[in-house]
Image (tube, helix red, strand yellow):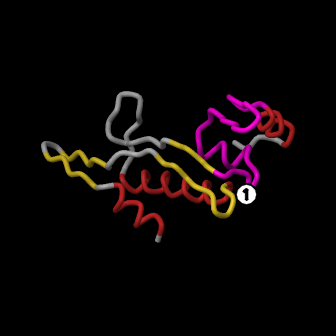
Amino acid sequence: MKLDKDEAAKKFLSPYYDDGITRLWHERCIDGMEQILPPDIGDVLVTSPPYNVGKEYERLMPFGDYLKLISDMYVGAYRVIKPGGYAVVNYSDYYIFEGGNTSIQPMTYLHNIISE
């Protein structure tokens, strides 16, 4: 759900933390980038997307859906970070649970799939 212009402006003007140099918003990353932030606004974006490893606060999703989520996050980050800026992404290796067998997909490999 997109915010109307006034709601977006209010959220943009009311970050979770603002010390005059640094502004932080406590939002679902993809929604916040899309609804609140204009293009090329930030020097650094810091996020911790869902790990999708079975933590009790997560909703497990199929591998393809997880790739889409991470890809959407990267697309949004690219849009809002100034040229020469940085994205700091905290993530875990991806675990695939199949009965008694668990396989691990290193996120560095997934990053390469997403960036292509």
Provide residue 68's location: percent of width, then percent of height. 48, 56
Q: Amino acid at mark 1?
A: Asp
| Residue drawn at (78%, 38%) of the image | 12
| Residue drawn at (68%, 54%) of the image | 80
Q: Is residue 40 above or below residue 2?
A: below
Magenta span covers which residues?
14-43
Is 42 magenta? The answer is: yes
Which residue does the numbered mark 1 point to in the structure image? 40
Is 46 magenta? The answer is: no
In this rendered view, identify the residue nearer to me: 36 or 56: 36
Counting the numbered discs, the total is 1
Provide residue 53's location: percent of width, then percent of height. 32, 40
In this rendered view, identify the residue nearer to me: 113 or 98: 113
Q: Please state, as top left, top right, bottom left or bottom right, where the N terminus lies in the image.
A: top right
Left or right: residue 38 versus residue 91 is right
Left or right: residue 110 versus residue 101 is right
Q: Is residue 35 above or below residue 10?
A: below
Left or right: residue 35 versus residue 27 is right
In this rendered view, identify the residue nearer to me: 112 or 88: 88
In this rendered view, identify the residue nearer to me: 74 or 96: 74
